[in-house]
Image: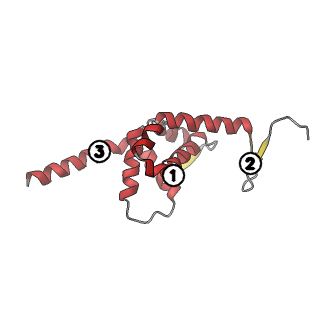
Amino acid sequence: PEDTGVETLTNTKNRTKINIKDYSSIIRERDRFRAQINYSLLLMDHPSRKVQIDEIVDIATEVLTSSRRTLKVDGEERPIEFIRERYRKLTISHIKYLLESLASHTNGITNVAGFIRTALFNAPITMETHYEALVNHDLAAYED
């Protein structure tokens, strides 16, 4: 084979070749997502959760850079562009909401990556209602 001057990494599981250009685009997407969620401020607010925040960023980056046409989220195969659209709406508030949810989740999670992928997908459409329900619950308790 001809030497193209491009280093190739090989994933031994499925033998998919990823060239450095592709890897660079993954790094750019990770950096873009970090900026989107205000990663630096998130780490300042939650320094002890850095590993967990980095896991969330990595899972989001995998979704945002996936070459698949569909991905399983919330128990269903969904078009990747639909999932990406939701992920592009995520903010620091959604990540804090996810961190709170993970901290209060007492049931065992068998597929952590799938759980986080689904939680990120649902966060933009459930966070406000979740917090409103908490406020309503607290107000009802206060009135009693």
- Residue at x 40%, y 50% (from the top left corner): 99
The amino acid type, in three-letter code, at marker 3 is Thr
Indicate the colouring scheme. Answer: secondary structure
Query: What is the C-alpha distance between the residues marked 2 and 3?
Result: 42 Å
Q: Which residue is mark 1?
A: 51
The 10 Å Cα crowd at callout 2, few under 14, some 14 to 19, many 20 or more, is few
- Residue at x 39%, y 45% (from the top left corner): 96
Q: Give 81 or 34, whichever is nearer the viewer.
A: 34
Q: Which residue is mark 3?
A: 129
Q: Secondary structure at mark 2?
A: loop
The answer to whether residue 4 is above or below residue 131 is above
Residue 118 at least partly seen: no
The amino acid type, in three-letter code, at marker 2 is Thr
Q: Is residue 133 left or right of residue 60?
A: left
The 10 Å Cα crowd at callout 1, few under 14, some 14 to 19, many 20 or more, is few
Query: What is the C-alpha distance between the residues marked 1 and 2?
Result: 28 Å
Location of residue 73 in the rendering, given as x and y in whole percent from the top left corner: 50, 50
Q: Which residue is mark 2?
A: 16
